[in-house]
Amino acid sequence: MAADGHIRVSAPRGPVHSGSGDQYITWASRAGERRLGAGNTPLRISQEHQRYLTGCFVPPRHYGRAADALGRAGAVVLLDGPTGIGRRTAATMLLRDVSVDGDSIEELPLSPSPDEETPETLPDDHYLLDLSNVADENYPAAERTLMHYRSSVERSGARMVAVLPAGLEWMRDPDLYPLVVHLGRPPARYVFSRHLRAQGLAFGPDELATDGLVRMFATAPMSELARLARLIARARDSHRNGTSFAEWRDKALEAATKWSAEVAKQLTEHRSIPERSLLLAAAMAEGASADAVHRAAERLLDVLRYQREDTPGLGRADLGERLKALSVERGDDGRAGFARLAYGGAVRRHFWENFPDARPDFRDWVGRCLELPELGAEDRTRMVARFSERALAAGRPDDLCELVERWTRPSAPGPFRAEATTALELGLIHERYGSYFRSRVYDWAWARKSSLAPDLVAALTDVCRQVIAVTHPEQAVVRLRHLAQRQTGPEAEAARAALLELARGNRRLFRRLSERLVKSALSASPGVRSGLGPDILLELLDPVALRITPPRQEFTRAWRAVMSTRPAAAWEPTVRRWLTGHASRRVGEWALKAMVDAAAGSSLRLSHLYTTACDWAERPDADASLETRARRDVRQRISERFCRNIDLVQGIEDMCSEPGAQGTRERE
């Protein structure tokens, strides 16, 4: 059995892409297909992003003060400063600097769900609390949460860094003042240079001295500088924007600073609804076939209830002419796109920002576009990601949730579970709305059996296991437990398997899950079956799948709950596997003593344990190793000690426990 894997959190909230254009790192699945690439996992992606941050990070002013303050056990540091200087990244790097290799950073929930307990803080743990997006009216409640976490961290000897919302100093409790470090803007040119080098771009000092870059260095947020570096890399990789850094730089600066005005000008020149629909369809379906763009534009006209002209199709401008008039190119492979770098992103942004009344129609349109047979799986994924980006930027997270429910209904016109999972994932990793989507996942998971579609249960299981568990593992366990206990069918079984997988590899999660299941199992009314809790507990206790040494107290309580709520025939095979594990030296004797302690007070349960050990000594499990089956003398010695512990618990200290001879006696 392995030591505690401590696969908890990593920060930040997953892969970050703040530029326009396409970067869709998702682990949505369709029939088990993974979209991460062979060998990748969410945890590995997050760890790789931390390494990327390390390569690009430039400490902001006063970072050293924060590092000094965080040096002692039990330290709490609160980071303040203007938006855009990279406070969250600074918090991540502070915690990373005081961590030992292999340690993880756990992000604390700001608004726990009703049945989520305060995370148990332990010495040498490292916590991040991000309050940067808390609104004025919500700050008092957020500060109470912060104060609660602070007390727990200081008592336990852990460390915590919290990112405060900018501009709310006047609302801050005076007791927090000594913990605050005011960060200043880092040298922006140096930050930009680090990002360029991380993208493999070579440049000379003079090439960063243009007027446009100098203006950005003075005021642009760090995320915009990172975005610009990625745009320059895109210009290089496209092989259609020149061959030198200066050419790539100029094209990227145009995309970052000029396209908004260009799109506005284009729309003043093309005012008809069919033209604008085709332009938006080209931006949303960029990279798909021209036929798909055409069909998507027609679908938008339907959603807008536009009355088409009576002129027959052959009497109107053809598709190629219409696309060309909008500066949309059709390649030799038939795929449509814009020649100008990142222009499609500017088009999408313009429509969502400048047609607010049409946003519900845009949502419905995207929902219906997935039905188009001309769109392939990757085309649909890109469209979902582009819609998610714009909906969240416009402050409409509910639009994503509504589409998730539509796409997973049994009546949905296609199998869109992968697209629903992608939308959920993009909401969960969003810096502003991540907590909103975790709350929505909780609400769905809490729903009664009849209200959730099987595909929605499957999508929720996917994101709990692959997304929430990476950053908020305890919240993932809570949601998976509800899905496993409140739903039915294969999807509930998958949620149960994901739940057990998490808890079997982490002592903290094992403790949390077992405590909750024990509580629910033992609180059931007499004579009433206590639900699936004991069944899940019994699976959790199986030593074959455990990758940790479970906490003894919770291990004992879990066994007591299982023994008191399930017949002996259900749990005796698991007892045998623990005995076999001890014979193979994979399990310490503490586990056997804990099982006896769990049965204490019930002579009937102790008798079942006794006879199980005796039978195991004579007939080992068929799946035990050949060595274990061959060493009958070893099994007998283990059985003797086990039975002697049973006698000691019952006060029969002077009676010799002889396996085989007393295996069937009544112990009432």
Image: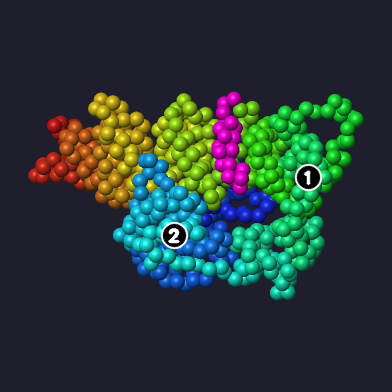
Residue span colored magenta: 391-411
Q: Amino acid at mark 2?
A: Trp
Most extreme residue toward the left, as rendered? 654
- How many numbered marks are there? 2
* Label drawn at residue 170: 2
Task: Name the residue rendered at 52%, 71% in the picture.
Answer: 61
* Residue type at the position of mark 1: Leu
Q: Position of 258 compared to 641: left or right?
A: right
Q: Is residue 322 visible?
A: yes
Q: Position of residue 170 (x, y in %)?
A: 44, 60
**Dot 1: what SS?**
helix
Vertical side of 138 occupied by 407: above or below: above
- Check disc 1 and report the residue beneath it: 267
Q: Secondary structure at mark 2?
A: helix
Q: Residue furthest right?
A: 315
Q: Is residue 384 left or right of residue 555?
A: right
Image point (48%, 27%), residue name:
451
In the figure, is residue 44 to the left or right of 292?
left
On whether residue 597 falls in the magenta region, the answer is no
In the image, residue 50 sits, relative to residue 592, either above or below, namely below
